Image (tube, coloured by chain):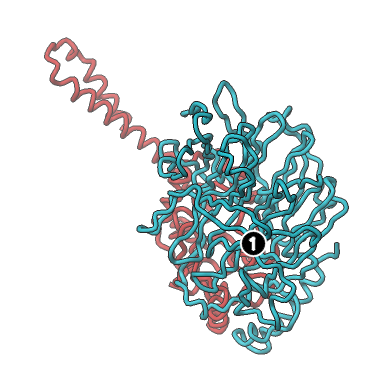
Chain colours: A red, B cyan
Amino acid sequence: MGRAAGRSESRASNGVMHVSTAWWRPLALGLAAAAFCADAAFAETAALAERIRSCTACHGEDGNSSTPNIPSLAGQPEFFVMNQLFLMREGVRRIEVMMPLVKDLKDEELTGLAKHFARLEAKPSGEAIDPALAQRGADLANLGRCGSCHLPNLSGQEQMPRLAKQRVDYMIRALKEFRDDKRSGADTQMTAVVIGLRDPDLAALAHYAASRE
Amino acid sequence: MTKSIATRSALGAASATAILAIGLTAALAQAPPGFSPIDRSNPAASGQDANMRPHPTPPTPTPLEQIPVGKLKLPAGFKAEVWSHGHPGARTMVRGDKGTIFMGTRVIGRVYAITEKDGKREAKVLLQGLTQPNGLAFKDGALYVFAINKVLRYDNIESKLDNPGEPVELTEKFNLPDTVHHNWKYVAFGPDGKLYVQVGSNCNICEVNPGTHGQIRRYNADGSGMEIVARGIRNTVGFDWHPVTKELWFTDNGRDWAGNDGPQDELNRIPKGQEGANFGFPYCHANGIADPDIKRPNPCAGVILPAALTGPHSAGLGVKFYTGSMFPKSYQNVGFIARRGSWNREKKFGYDVVMFKAQGGKATLSPFMTGLLDEGRNEFYGRPVYLLQMPDGAMLVSDEQNGAIYRISYGASGGPQRVSRQ
């Protein structure tokens, strides 16, 4: 792309300038502009690809994490990912390991990353799902109205993450943080929903959520 | 103040044991009596669309040309303009002695300082990374910042807006409950010089300890001398004092998942001499409606019923009594309420500013600023949250959804439009 831009510029300055008929000028300008835009888009894509690589080292090549306690990002709602990255960059959601990765990201890059992960297909983590726990989790999820925000199939929407096919170990950890008021930068609604639940209840919720399609 | 933690964990354990012992659905119906923060709403009973959820607040600002100021409708003679913009999550506003507008937010965790320079407004991020710093107050040159579970005081703040430095930490002194839900703060200094502080009920509907939650408290400015001035409140997010009677008027947001039409939100008044009174939550709502999920005999006995109902799920936030000289005389001492607008209602409601005239203990609402709700399409364009009267008598209204402030002025005294375009 960079070379193409160079070619069109050199073509425009390669003696053709002396042709007095001006018909080609808008065309040449158009070509140059198109080449410039393509170049910028390429640079953007290349930078984004680089950013994505820094995510996938932990969150999985295809956005599905096989690392314990690290969440999958594949199939997450676009606004959710953008919003969480924004809050991490802002220092509201404080995750030490994420700080160096997000601190210099521009808003457009947050959106680019969010679009990328939203497009990927969520896949089960391969962790064992206990059917009895999942059944108990389904009852708890009904009482807690999980589906009203996260949608009945728990695929998430807007600021609410996808829970279906998310890692069980990550969700147990996150639910404990919500319950114990340890989760920074989140809507307090989640704390209100899981307050008073015991660890086995949280595990049941996680097994149920992960098992949803 | 008694520590709430011991009570909470003991009762939480008791509830959890009950859940295990007798099964989930039965547990809610037969939960042991006493205070428990577990939500007691019955998902099957409300008959509402089960997929309603809170609307997202964008962390990024709305570009100036997309701010819906053109949609605003006001009574004849009033006009609205964009006064400042580019500060996402715009909520609470207080004014410093030197004219700085300090603005609090929720999830984005910022406090902004908006200053005027060469006729243009500049908004800068003064503080960031806080947990929902919605509670702001200004007194004697100091900015008080109440985030969830954090109280900070920045002395002499207007002379160090570029580098506010380390604050005086008052968290321990105020000793507020450690729970997070419904505990983004609203605070204000009263005519008695005391600092009034909201403490919400940390649930949608549950039995909270009235000694620790569901209150308005007042303190000396240093956090000493705590008194409970109102109890039985679900979550007030705004209050003001009547300019003549000096009584405190406050909004209270009603519970969710009990139907589209209510129980309605409330505008309440603490009658003189009745500080510490009970306003009914969780047993008695609105104009005396018994809660469908948490029942007890005579639920409204001894409860002060609202001065006005403010609409179903309308989310009344900021309250301000008008005392300026710009609006017509008939607006003197009239109250205004910013209604952020509903989420737990199939047909959206609110998204406006209403006004009320206080007569005795009652008030009647009428529209003031509308136009941000398209009822036909069931869509909203903005969310008015707080109000601030300026020295010239104009009224500022913050719009959380668009990260903007509107200036409402009347007549020729409106002044030139001075919006800085970026």
Between B253 and A7, the one lying in front of the other is: B253
Specify the quadrant of the image occupied by residue B102. top right
Q: Is residue B110 visible?
A: no
Q: Give the percent coordinates (x, y) of residue A9.
A: 26, 21
Left or right position of B224 against B19: right
Between A48 and B356, the one lying in front of the other is: B356
Q: Give the percent coordinates (x, y) of residue B216.
A: 74, 58
As drawn, which residue projects farthest toward the bottom? B22
Disc 1 residue type? Ala
At mark 1, the secondary structure is loop
Q: Residue at x 56, y 46 (%)?
A: B89
Q: How many marks?
A: 1
Q: Give the percent coordinates (x, y) of residue B228.
A: 80, 60
Q: Residue at x 61, y 84 (%)?
A: B24
- Is residue A137 placed above or below B65 in the rendered structure? below
Left or right position of B271 against A170: right
Q: Residue at x 52, y 31 (%)?
A: B414
As drawn, which residue projects farthest toward the right? B225
Give the chain of mark 1. B
Label 1 belongs to which residue?
B307
Q: Is residue B72 visible?
A: yes
Between B238 and A97, the one lying in front of the other is: B238
Between A208 and B52, the one lying in front of the other is: B52
Q: Give the percent coordinates (x, y) of residue A99.
A: 61, 45
- Is residue B207 placed above or below B98 in the rendered structure? below
Image quadrant containing the N terminus of chain B: bottom right
Q: Residue at x 42, y 56 (%)?
A: A118
Left or right position of B185 against B275: left
Q: Residues within 10 Å of mark 1 (few under 14, many from 20)?
A: many
